[in-house]
Image: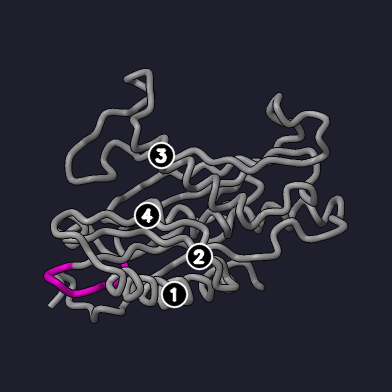
Amino acid sequence: MRPSGRAPDQMREIEMIPGFSAHAEGSCLVKFGRTHVLVTASVEERLPPFLRGKGQGWVTAEYGMLPRATHTRGSREAAKGKQSGRTQEIQRLIGRSLRAVTDLVALGERQITLDCDVIQADGGTRTAAISGAWVALRLALDGIHKATPFAADPLALQVAAISCGVHQDQAVLDLDYDEDSTAGTDANFVLTGTGGIVEVQGTAEGAPFDEEMLLRLLRLARIGCGEIFAAQRVATGR
């Protein structure tokens, strides 16, 4: 039995609230159970120096956790003067995941920054951030299109992410903190709406896992991402 009482292939309750921020061009408050992440998309008509004059845009991400997002207070990274390695790794993952489904040429010479701020953490913050970032990006692009129509949709595919793992020798979907902290294997899957694999992060915390277990986790990830894709479509009206 899982600590939460869920079935092995059962997700936590998903909620996506679009337009949560009044000022951002696109935003989404995403909830995976007790993990809550606010994602905002900001559009700028300028580019990083390495992309100027190349006829394409850029999508990037920043990630952070509020001090009391977890059980005990964490120091603000801004107060320390530097980001942790974990923060840098996660925000790079978010950026890669969204760029994988974005046509940067169709986007035009503009940059969209996805700010992912963890309000409350109970496992799976990076996967919730990626899933919510797609909604925020979609809404921002829809706003641009109303003012200046795109020749082609820069975001033709969906992308979502979910965690899977081995808890008490059983493959389970969407780990919360209680499971994640004691899992024998922990993996994150980033998948597209057409079934493509963007990225897989898998680690044996204890005994190594075999190919069959990896495939079992992938099958669970496809179930979970299917539910997320449906929630994204509802949130964006698509």
Disc with the residue nearer the chain's start (2 vs 3): 3
Main secondary structure along the magenta-highlighted residues:
strand
Q: Rounded to the nearest whole Å, what is the CA distance between mark 2 and mark 3? A: 18 Å
| Range of residues picked out in magenta | 167-174
What kind of residue is marked 2? Leu
What kind of residue is marked 1? Arg
Above or below, comparing residue 89 to residue 52 in the picture: below
User: Circle 4 is placed at which residue position?
Assistant: 201
Q: Nearer the viewer, residue 161 or 17?
A: 161
In the picture, the quarter occupied by the C terminus is bottom right
Q: Residue 236: x percent and y percent?
A: 62, 67
Mark 4 or 2: in front is: 4
The question of residue 88 being in magenta is answered with no
Disc with the residue nearer the chain's start (1 vs 3): 3
The residue at 45%/59% (across/down) is 30
User: Circle 2 is placed at which residue position?
Assistant: 191
Q: Rounded to the nearest whole Å, what is the CA distance between mark 4 and mark 2? A: 12 Å
Count the numbered circles shown: 4
The residue at 31%/50% (across/down) is 120
Disc with the residue nearer the chain's start (4 vs 2): 2
Q: Tell me: 87 left or right of 165.
A: right
Mark 3 or 4: in front is: 4
SS at mark 3?
Answer: helix
User: Circle 1 is placed at which residue position?
Assistant: 222
Q: Rounded to the nearest whole Å, what is the CA distance between mark 1 and mark 3? A: 23 Å
Q: Are marks 1 and 2 in contact (CB under 8 Å)?
A: yes
Q: Tell me: 202 left or right of 145.
A: left
SS at mark 1?
Answer: helix
Above or below, comparing residue 52 to residue 158 in the picture: above
Q: Residue 53: x percent and y percent?
A: 83, 30
Q: Residues within 10 Å of mark 3 (few under 14, many from 20)?
A: few
Q: Rounded to the nearest whole Å, what is the CA distance between mark 1 and mark 4? A: 15 Å
